[in-house]
């Protein structure tokens, strides 16, 4: 959605010559990582006959991440100066990976109708970030009934993420069932999976037993995120029932 400004492109740099100034952009295209920074120099030459100052306004998709230093460049006739463009894409799911065009509008203070646009391309790197959380941390179940948890999986990266969900314990005391077992998340989206954990053996009397287990969120990179959780298994016959029968 940029204005249809007249622009002339060169093979390695772009130079636009107007009545009062020349501007040149170098070092494009620019690779940049979300959360990082890439820089580009903009050289402006005052071809006019009076002292002038030139301002640069970022345009387009990359405008919110673009900083111009200094904000205004004063130049004597025949002199040239350099502005620094800093591109700082945020490390957010909304920062799309791949080619992202950038553009700046250059304006003369002495002759405001003299404006032109310089543009280039950023190569934004992809990044993978999946976060997961299980709630509640501890579930309760009597006998061999199932305790229930919810597993929230959030894709905070800027690429689709396919993950596999599974769980278990070291001693084989519980069976863990997760539905769905795998999910594919678009950038900036989340999904809830249901976790049901059941003790493999029941007991009739005595204090409640604690069964720690783990749920894993595997992105296929060999480093799954592991979340601890606990099943509190209660006796089949409640203690209050035993006491009531004895009293009776």
Image (tube, grey):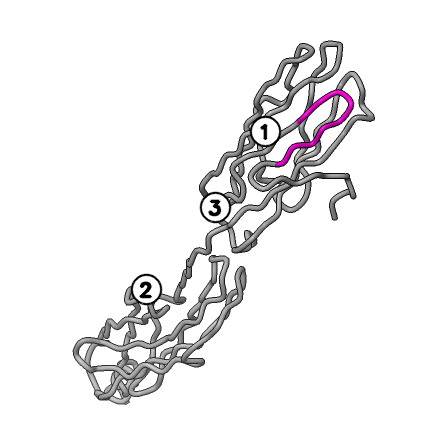
Q: Quadrant of residue 70?
A: top right
**In magenta stretch: residue 15:** yes
Residue 193, horizontal then vertical, whole percent: 45, 75
Q: Is 87 rendered above or below residue 153?
A: above
Helix or strand or loop: what does disc 1 sit on? strand
Instruction: Please report the residue visible at 53 percent of the width from the left and 38 percent of the height from the top.
Output: 87
- Outermost residue, left side: 171
Which quadrant of the figure contains the C terminus?
A: bottom left
Identify the element where label 2 is drawn: strand
**Mark 3 Cα shell of 10 Å, populated few (<14), some (14-19), many (≥20):** some
Mark nearer the viewer, 2 or 1 = 1
Q: Is residue 73 magenta?
A: no
Foreground residue among 184 and 96: 96
Residue visible at 40% across and 63% down in the picture:
133
Tell me if residue 55 comes above or below residue 26 in the rendering. Answer: above
Q: Position of residue 181 (x, y in %)?
A: 41, 80
Magenta extent? 14-22
Q: Identify the mark at residue 94; answer none if there is no mark.
A: none
Q: Earlier in the sequence, mark 3 or mark 1?
A: 3
Residue 131 appears left or right of 42: left
Nearer the N terminus, badge 2 or badge 1?
Answer: 1
Label 2 vs label 3, nearer the camera = 3
Residue 31 - label: 3
What residue sits right under mark 2 in the picture? 225
- Residue furthest out toward the right: 113
Query: Residue 175 in the image: x percent, y percent?
Result: 28, 84
Circle 1 residue? 42
Dominant secondary structure of the magenta stretch? strand
Q: How far, Cα to Cα, is label 2 from label 1?
A: 44 Å
Q: Are marks 3 and 1 in contact (CB under 8 Å)?
A: no
Task: Classify mark 3: helix, strand or loop.
Answer: strand
């Amino acid at each position: 959605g940029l204005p249809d400004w007249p622009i002339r492109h060169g093979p390695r740099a772009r130079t636009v010559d107007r009545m009062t100034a020349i501007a040149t952009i170098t070092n494009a295209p620019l690779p940049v990582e979300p959360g990082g920074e890439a820089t580009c120099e903009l050289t402006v030459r005052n071809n006019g006959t009076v002292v002038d100052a030139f301002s640069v306004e970022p345009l387009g998709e990359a405008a919110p991440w673009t900083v111009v230093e200094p904000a205004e460049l004063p130049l004597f006739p025949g002199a040239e100066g350099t502005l620094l463009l800093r591109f700082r894409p945020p490390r957010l799911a909304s920062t799309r990976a791949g080619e992202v065009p950038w553009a700046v509008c250059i304006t003369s203070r002495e002759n405001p109708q003299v404006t032109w646009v310089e543009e280039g391309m950023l190569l934004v790197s992809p990044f993978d970030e999946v976060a997961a959380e299980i709630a509640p941390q501890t579930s309760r179940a009597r006998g061999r009934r199932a305790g229930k948890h919810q597993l929230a999986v959030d894709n905070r990266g800027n690429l689709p993420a396919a993950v596999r969900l599974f769980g278990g314990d070291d001693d084989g005391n519980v069976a863990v069932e997760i539905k769905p077992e795998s999910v594919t998340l678009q950038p900036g989206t989340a999904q809830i999976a249901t976790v049901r954990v059941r003790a493999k053996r029941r007991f009739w009397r005595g204090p409640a037993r604690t069964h720690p287990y783990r749920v894993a969120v595997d992105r296929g990179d060999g480093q799954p995120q592991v979340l601890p959780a606990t099943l509190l298994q209660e006796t089949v016959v409640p203690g209050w029932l035993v006491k009531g029968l004895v009293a009776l």
